Image: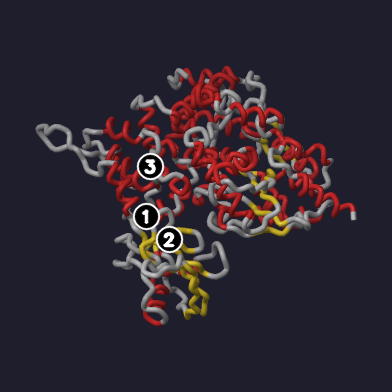
């Protein structure tokens, strides 16, 4: 298993732990991640709105790099996944657009023939590596924990383009968490939005969206939440304190990025998982897991 | 098949709040949610109140929420509801006040639609009629399919958290007319729809695309509005500054400068208010160094911008 690895801007800056722990998980499971040092930001759906053709070309350049490496792209960010998958879908289904884009890429010595697929760490863990194999690799089972899987938006929708699972009834993240030994909590907010993409435009609405998702999980007695998206992680963890003030309700819900929990269960060195960087302390949850695995 | 159907009831004439009522119902294999509601009303409880008319997904009257998802009751077979709770929970649409049981007051929805001036203001009469090409018609085709059922509005993330947000149906309607080549008010419409609470407040959650029973794809129409507003030079707002910062950062460094993004989007004054938050993030090692190392091959990226005629 070999992929061109695309961590995305958030995992390279604000949320480095998403990148670091993705690499730990990949190393442990024997998934080879090849760096794309010349890949740009995908534009996160924003570049499309500034200039659609430019966004297509910038993304086609990323796909051309992976095509040159002879591998598909694995990203650990849901918004990067959706942005790239939508543009890749357009390029694959519109020969004129692909030809126009290649006219520009030719000027920088590149070409994209439309063969690359975009996948997400979550999908690779669940389907390609497989939950059965993953279960056998667990050294520190998470069976003390009731985890609320938070899928968010951009690994699910639009379903007809992403097409991995039913966007109204997703199972992948729950399956991965169960493979790690955890109990999973069902709650309505799991396929809804964390509000991240309106944080800088309508901060109050964004914080309320994050707060509602956390409260929905809290009301079902979840010990913590897990998300496959660094942007959801930022919304739910970093901004949770602000959301608490807005709702005047303390939630103190620990939020994990997917690969942090996978790496924890795989027995990674606890100090390499950046739990100290969380704004809502996950100390209690981590202690419970460590305590249990010592018994 | 016998199934437990739990309905959220509300009677304005009783002093009680809303309550849940369960019915055990025999359901034919292909029964729609509407047929189930009708059979409950006929066989179990005549007081159950809901809206319905055509039964053919044309009139848009019968939208309700089933296990947390807004659907058209006549357009959804109960056996296809594979999401949410094990029992079937039927509730009124969200984001609107309830009148009785499953009937909501659509006033907030219509109020937003009205704001968009949903009519064509024709261009000055010329010698012949305004010809609309097939390509031009296709641009507004999806948005013209709306049957105003309110499903997108009822489940909209931002409408749930901000009453001031126009919502997906009205914004799609806004594009229906702003994108119509026969209309004379395009600039005015785009300016109106660029104001706070309108096109730039959408969080791109894609829920409205999932919920719409008529393939209107409201969020896609919101994105068309945004592209047109940028092209029309309506750029003095946070939304446009945000997307332009992406365009500039990718050109200059190949990636985002997340440290300067808030400053570029909301401006110096508003950014000052974010300092306490920034300090908390700084303490947790979450504020990256503001000077970025360019990606390898940044010259190629700059060349692409130049070839495509994009300044910044």
Q: Earlier in the sequence, mark 1 or mark 3?
A: 1
Chain ID at mark 3: B
Residue pointed to by mark 1: B150
Mark 3: give few (<14), some (14-19) or many (20+) Cα within 10 Å: many
Residue A145 visible here: yes
Q: Position of residue A159 (x, y in %)?
A: 51, 51
Closer to the eye: label 1 or 3: 1
Residue pointed to by mark 3: B221
Q: Position of residue A46 (x, y in %)?
A: 49, 33
**Residue at figure coordinates x 62%, y 50% from the top left:** A150
Q: Quadrant of residue B185?
A: top left
Q: Secondary structure at mark 3?
A: helix
Q: Which of B269 and B176 lies nearest the eye of the viewer? A: B269
Q: Secondary structure at mark 1?
A: loop
Mark 1 and mark 2 residues within 8 Å of each other at the beta carbon: no
Q: Earlier in the sequence, mark 1 or mark 2?
A: 2
Q: Earlier in the sequence, mark 3 or mark 2?
A: 2
Q: Position of residue B74 (x, y in %)?
A: 38, 67
Judged left or right of residue B6, residue B48 is: left
Examine the rendered structure and indicate whether residue A185 appears above or below residue B231.
below
Tag of residue B71: 2
Q: Quadrant of residue B233?
A: top left
Looking at the image, the residue that sits furthest to the front is B15
Residue A116 visible here: no
Mark 1 → mark 2, Cα distance in angstroms:
9 Å
């Amino acid at each position: 298993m070999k992929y061109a690895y695309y961590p995305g801007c958030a995992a390279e800056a604000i949320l480095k732990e998403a990148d670091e722990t993705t690499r730990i998980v990949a190393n442990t499971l024997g998934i080879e991640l090849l760096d794309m040092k010349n890949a740009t930001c995908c534009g996160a759906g924003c570049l499309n709105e500034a200039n659609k053709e430019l966004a297509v070309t910038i993304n086609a350049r990323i796909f051309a790099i992976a095509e040159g490496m002879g591998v598909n792209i694995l990203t650990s960010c849901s918004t990067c996944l959706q942005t790239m998958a939508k543009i890749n879908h357009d390029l694959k289904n519109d020969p004129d657009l692909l030809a126009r884009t290649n006219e520009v890429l030719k000027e920088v010595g590149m070409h994209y023939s439309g063969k690359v697929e975009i996948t997400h760490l979550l999908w690779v863990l669940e389907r390609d590596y497989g939950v059965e194999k993953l279960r056998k690799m667990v050294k520190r089972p998470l069976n003390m924990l009731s985890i609320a899987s938070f899928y968010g938006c951009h690994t699910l929708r639009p379903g007809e383009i992403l097409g991995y699972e039913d966007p109204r009834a997703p199972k992948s993240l729950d399956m991965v968490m169960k493979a790690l030994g955890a109990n999973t909590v069902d709650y309505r907010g799991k396929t809804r939005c964390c509000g991240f993409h309106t944080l800088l435009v309508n901060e109050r609405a964004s914080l309320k969206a994050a707060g509602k998702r956390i409260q929905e999980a809290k009301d079902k007695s979840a010990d913590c939440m897990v998300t496959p998206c660094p942007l959801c992680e930022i919304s739910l963890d970093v901004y949770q304190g602000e959301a608490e003030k807005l709702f005047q309700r303390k939630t103190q819900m620990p939020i994990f990025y997917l690969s942090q929990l996978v790496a924890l269960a795989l027995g990674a060195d606890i100090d390499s998982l950046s739990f100290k960087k969380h704004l809502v302390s996950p100390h209690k949850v981590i202690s419970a897991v460590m305590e249990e695995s010592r018994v | 098949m016998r199934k437990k159907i739990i309905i959220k009831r509300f009677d304005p004439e009783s002093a009680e709040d809303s309550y849940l009522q369960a019915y055990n119902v025999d359901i034919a294999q292909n029964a729609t949610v509407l047929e189930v509601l009708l059979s409950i009303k006929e066989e179990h409880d005549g007081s159950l109140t809901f809206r319905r008319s055509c039964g053919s997904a044309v009139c848009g009257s019968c939208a309700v929420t089933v296990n947390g998802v807004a659907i058209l009751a006549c357009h959804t077979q109960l056996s296809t509801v594979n999401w949410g709770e094990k029992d079937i929970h039927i509730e009124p649409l969200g984001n609107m006040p309830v009148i009785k049981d499953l009937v909501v007051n659509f006033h907030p929805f219509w109020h937003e639609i009205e704001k968009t001036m949903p009519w064509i203001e024709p261009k000055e009469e010329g010698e012949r009629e305004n010809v609309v090409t097939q390509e031009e018609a296709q641009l507004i085709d999806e948005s013209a399919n709306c049957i105003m059922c309110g499903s997108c509005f009822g489940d909209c993330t931002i409408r749930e958290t901000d009453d001031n947000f126009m919502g997906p149906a009205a914004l799609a309607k806004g594009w229906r007319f702003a994108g119509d080549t026969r209309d004379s008010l395009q600039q005015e419409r785009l300016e109106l729809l660029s104001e706070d609470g309108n096109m730039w407040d959408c969080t791109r959650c894609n829920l409205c695309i999932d919920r719409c029973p008529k393939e209107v794809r409201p969020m896609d129409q919101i994105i068309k509005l945004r592209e047109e507003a940028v092209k029309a030079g309506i750029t003095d707002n946070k939304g446009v500054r945000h997307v332009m910062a992406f365009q500039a950062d990718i050109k200059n460094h190949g990636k985002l400068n997340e440290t300067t993004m808030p400053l570029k989007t909301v401006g110096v004054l508003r950014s000052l208010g974010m300092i306490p938050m920034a300090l908390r993030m700084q303490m947790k090692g979450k504020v990256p160094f503001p000077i970025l190392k360019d990606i390898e091959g940044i010259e190629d990226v700059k060349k692409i911008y130049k070839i495509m005629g994009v300044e910044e």
